[in-house]
Image (tube, rainbow, N blue to C red):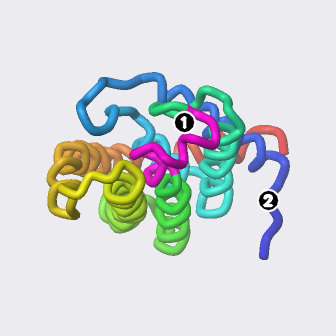
Amino acid sequence: MKKITLKEYMLCALFTALMVAGAYIRIPFPLLPVTLQPFICALSGLVLGARPAALSMTVYMLLGLAGLPVFAGGSGLTAVFGRTFGFIVGFIAGAYVIGRISERLGKPTPANNLKALLPGLAAIYIPGIAHMLLIMRVYLGDEQAGLLAVLSGNLPYLVKDTVLFVMTAFAGASVVPAARKALAGKAQ
């Protein structure tokens, strides 16, 4: 297994900082705040690759659990009991999936990017929805909360993220190679 270089650690820190900034750029909605975080997660996977992208999302999660105000829905250990924490875990999985698939596919064409981004979106939403359902049913005691209700409540966000990921697939065909080339040209 290849070691992560110092440069990759620095890029991880950059994407961690972007995730923090993405949490503060938000539009309030009833169930979840709309943030740029899924987009930043996707971009980290496309640009950094699987391991560094997952590391950057893991650092983001650990900073929030340590109490730094980096989560859109509140930080600290109690964030685990919030409805949105599953999506934070999903960012780690999504970044890894997107990175792993894009590494295997090679050239970041719109089609290849889409093949990496859509499974990555599923990797974000599956733990997010599952955790939300668990918190609503068990922790909050909402007997009415069922899978269909949680899915339908998240449908606007899923549609927004799907459209954003499709746009990212097309834009990434030119942006990702340029970003990779620029990052490769800097000091090692």
Q: Secondary structure at mark 2?
A: loop
Q: Amino acid at mark 1?
A: Met
Q: Position of residue 131 (x, y in %)?
A: 41, 58
Of circles 2 and 1, which is in front? 1
Q: Nearer the viewer, residue 65 or 99?
A: 65
What residue type is disc 2 on?
Ile
Stretch of the chain drawn in magenta: 75-88
Residue 4's tag is 2
Dot 1: within a 10 Å radius of its alpha carbon, few (fewer than 14), some, or many (20 or more) residues? many
Q: Main secondary structure of the magenta part?
A: helix
Which residue in the protein does label 1 denote? 19
Name the image quarter holding the N terminus: bottom right
Q: Position of residue 105 (x, y in %)?
A: 46, 72
Label 2: how many residues lie within 10 Å, few (<14), some (14-19) or many (20+)?
few
The Cα–Cα distance between marks 2 and 1, rounded to whole angstroms, is 20 Å
Q: Which mark is residue 160?
A: none
